[in-house]
Amino acid sequence: MATIPVMGVVAIAVFALLHITPGDPAVIIAGDYATVDDIARIRAKLGLDQPFVTQVGIWLGRIVRGDLGTSIFSGLPVATLIRQRTEATIGLTLFAMLISVGVGVPLGVLAAWKKASFIDRLVMLLAVSGFSMPVFWLGFLLVYVFAISMHWLPVQGYRPLAEGLWPFLRHLILPAVTLSVVYLALIARMTRASMLGVLSEDYIRTAFAKGLAPRRVLIHHALKNASLPVVTIIGIGFALLIGGAVVTESVFALPGLGRLTVDAIVRRDYPVIQGVILVVSGVYVLINLVVDVLYVVLDPRIRY
Amino acid sequence: MSPVMAAGTQHEPDSRALSPLAPSSGAPWLALRPGPLLARHPTLIAGGITLVLILIAGVLAPLWWTGDPLEMKPAVRLRPPSAERWFGSDNFGRDIYTRTLYGSRISLTVGAAVSTLSLVLGTTLGLVVGFYRRLDMIAMRVMDGLMAIPAILLALALMALMKASVQNVIIALLIPEIPRVVRLTRASVLSLREHLMVEGARALGARTPRILLRYVLPGLVAPLIVQGTYIAASAILFEAYLSFLGAGTPPHIPSWGNIMAEGRAYVQLAFWIILFPGIFLAATVLAINLVGDGLRDLLNVR
C-alpha cells in the first residue's frame, strides 16, 4: 500500500513545480504583455497571495475532492478538459500496447529459443534500433510513405469512436504503430532475457526430453514462468507510452491529453499542466498497483 | 547436466573475456587488446566509430564545407538536395546540411551534460541515502513520487516555467533522471554494505565517508558507466522531443529537434528538412545505445 504516499508526493511535487522554478510564477504565467492588474488577478486566482503552507493545504484538499481547478485560458474546469481528451489518448495507447505485446512477446520468445542465431541477432538489433528511434521522426516517415505517397491511410486527424469503429481505428493505425515501436522493442528485449533464464531450467529440458512439441514447451512451460518480468515492464512502460503519446499526438494532430499539455504549455496555462500530470501519474501508479496484484495471480508463491 | 549444455546455457560468450580478472572491480578494459575486442563486440565498435564520426562532424562543423547555419537566402527556399545543397534548404533558404552539422553540437552537449550531472548528483545522493536508514525511507518515497511522473511531462512542465535555453533544457531533463540514478546506486549500496569487506573496514575503525568512497563506490563504477550511456541516449532524444514540441532549445540555435519542428509544415513539399536531421538523431542515439549494450557485456553488468 505504498500507493497513497507516492500519490501524495506526486501531488506536492506537481504543486511545488510552480514554486521551485526561479521567478514569480504569476509573472511567468501572465506572459510578456501582461499588465500589473493581470498579474494580480492571476496571483489571486491561483491563490499565490496566500502563505505557502496554506497553499499546499488548499491544493491537497481540492485534489482529494477531485477538483483540479480551472483553466486560465478557457475558463473551463480542468477535469472537464481532461475528460474531453481521454478518448483519443486511451485509444492510442491501448492500440499501441496491443501491437507491442502482440509483436514484441513472440519476437522475444523466438529470439530466446533461437539464441545466438542470425534470427536472435536480427531481433536484438531491431530492438535496440527501436528504442533509439525518435518517435516523431518515425511518425513523419510513416506518414510520408503510407499517407502522402501511397494514400492508404489518412495523413492526420481523428474520428471519435462514436462515428464508428473503423474510421476511429483507421485514423489511429499510423499513430499507434509509431508509438508502439519503442515499447515493442523494450518488450521483445525483456521477453528474451526472461525466457533465456527460464529455458536453462531443468524442467524445460525434461519437457523437451519427454517429446513435447517445442511450441507447447515454449508457451506453456517457459513463457508462463517467464511472464513476471514481462508484466512488470508492461506496467513500467506505460510511462514511456504516455511520453511517446505526447509527441505522437502532436505529429498526427490527435486531440488527446498530450496535445492538451503542449497547448497548455504554449499558453502557460499552469492549472491544466498540473492537472494532466496529476491524472497521468495517478493512472501510472494505479497500473503498477494492478501489476503487483497480477504477480500474485501469475506466481502463487508471492504473497503480500 | 551435460558439459555441452552447461557451456551453452550457463555462460554468455562474453564472460570468458573477463574471467582472468573476474574478482577485480578495477579496470578490466585495460587488459583487453583491440583485436579480440573487435571480434567479440562488433556492435560496440560500430557504435563507437559512429559516435566519434558525429562528434568530429559537430565539433569541427566549420571545416566540413558548411556555411552560416543562420544565413537566410530567400531566393533558394525549399530546394531539394543537390550537389550544391547536399541536404536541401528550408523555407527561409537556410542550408539543412549546415544546420544539421551545427545541430549535433546541441545534442551532444545535452547528452554529455545530462548524463554526467545526473551520475554525479544521483550517485552522491544514492550513497548517502543507502547508508543512512532514516533518510532512506523519506528520500525513497520522494524518489518514487518523482519517478511516477512521466519524464517528458515533468520536463515539459519545467520548461514551461523557465526561459527557453540550452542550459534550462539540461536542467529540465536532469531532474526526472536523478531519481533513477539514486535508485540504482541505492540498490547496489544496500547489497554492498552487507559485504564482509565493509564489516572488516568498520572493525578497523574506518568512518562512513571512507567506507563509501573506498569500498562501495568502486563497485558502482561499472553499472554507472553503463547507465550513463543510456541516460545520454535518452537525453538526446528528449532534447529533440522538447525542441520539436516548441518547449526546448530556442529557435535561433539550430538543434535537430527544432530544425524538424520548423520542417513539419512542409512535410509534403520538402520532406528533406525532416529526413536528414532525423537520420543524424536516430544514428547518434543508436550508436550510444550500442556502446551502452557493448559496455554492459564487456563490464559484465547485471
Image: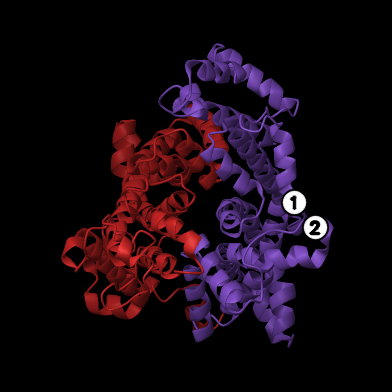
Chain colours: A purple, B red
Q: Say which element carries label 1.
A: helix
Q: How many marks?
A: 2
Q: Residue at x 41, y 65 (%)?
A: B273
Dot label at residue A87: 1
The amino acid on which the numbered mark 1 sits, given as a three-letter code, is Glu
In the displayed structure, does residue A133 sit left or right of residue A5? Answer: left
Residue B88, x across and y down, in percent: 34, 70
Q: Say which element carries label 2.
A: helix
Quadrant location of residue A149? bottom right
Q: Quadrant of the N terminus of chain B?
A: bottom right
Residue B107, x across and y down, in percent: 34, 55
Mark 1 or 2, nearer chain start: 1
Quadrant location of residue A112? bottom right
Q: Relative to A202, is B188 above or below?
A: above
Q: Relative to A73, is B269 above or below?
A: below
- Residue B149, can we see it? no
Residue at image mark 2 = A161
